Image (cartoon, rainbow, N blue to C red):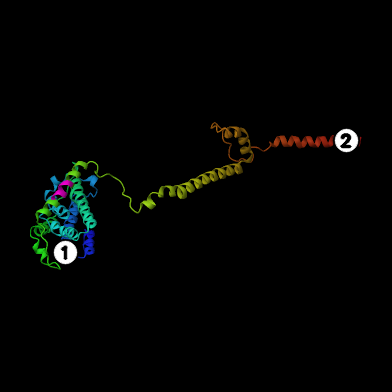
Amino acid sequence: QVGFMVAAVGLGTQLAINGAVALAFTNILYKTLLFMGTGAVLYATGKSKLTELGGLYKLMPAAFVLYMVGAVSISGFPLFSGFVSKGMVVYAAEVSHILPVFILLMIASVGTFVSVGLKLPYFTWFGKNNKLTVNTLPVGMYLGMGLTAFSCLFIGVYPAILYNILPYQVDYQPYTVAHLWETGSILIFTGLIFWLLVNKIKPKQGIILDFDWFYRRPAPLARKIFVDSPAYMFGKAEQASGIIVSQLVKFGANPVGRVVWYSKNLGKIITNKHQLSEEPYEFDPHRYRTPLGFMVIMVMLGFVVIALLSLLSGS
């Protein structure tokens, strides 16, 4: 809608400036009405995704009607405020003989009707969803939407009340046969196309990428290179360090037993076999110490040998 106003200012004619001012005024009305309708849906359902909405026209008929007043107003339907304001901007481009601007404004009008006048209300109010429950709307919501909807309708039916306060003398008649035929043809053709393609443009869960494409798309690869791979390497290094430290602690607790255990299981460890022999006991200073009786015998035997050697040498 602001794009229409900027285009009108760019055209610069009195008719275009009048159209920009009129559109700014009516845009406040029907855009506010659309926001209030959206707020009513949020309040009543607690949901904000089209994929979770549908069938609300049965549960909230009054809110649906008031919302649709805003939808048809912004789409430029006859008898509503958008028809008498937005049509002035399009007509200003036409009489200025600037064909590219006129065509682009017509395309923008079709896009507005498809998005706000057809797609959004269809999947919000008519889509299939039988599981929704709604809260009762406060009277104040209906009152605000009702007054704004009445303003959109009143200006559309009686545009002179708006035209009389515009900056320049208004030499424009919205309700001509040509304008009605042109608008009606566009709306009917657009509605038919939407009806044929409604299943193709059905809302789907997902993320719409805009400028964030430049950091969302490379993000998985960057994460894999700079986060996941270093984390994996550090994890493996930590695991290996834990194993080495654990084995060193076990070796320090029982060096002889650990050497014996390794000698028995080295082949199994290399071939990755899991049936290893029983772990050695914890360190016991007497486990591998030579028995005292054996040492006494050896000492006595040593004395005997020395005594024999002494006797033989003396003789």
Q: Residues within 10 Å of mark 2 (few under 14, many from 20)?
A: few
Q: Which mark is residue 15?
A: 1
Within 10 angstroms of label 1, few (less than 14), some, or many (20 or more) residues?
A: many
**Amino acid type, mark 2:** Leu
Q: Nearer the viewer, mark 2 or mark 1?
A: 1
The residue that disc 2 covers is 311
Q: Quadrant of residue 15?
A: bottom left
212 in magenta: no
At 63% from the left edge and 38% from the top edge, which residue is drawn? Answer: 259
Q: Main secondary structure of the magenta part?
A: helix
Q: Where is residue 82 drawn, in percent x and y?
A: 15, 57
Q: CA distance from mark 2 to mark 1?
A: 144 Å
- Of residues 176 and 21, the one drawn nearer to the viewer in this rendering: 176
Query: Could you tell me which secondary element the residue under label 2 belongs to?
Result: helix
Residue 81 placement, left or right of 258? left
Residue range corresponding to the magenta coloring: 184-189
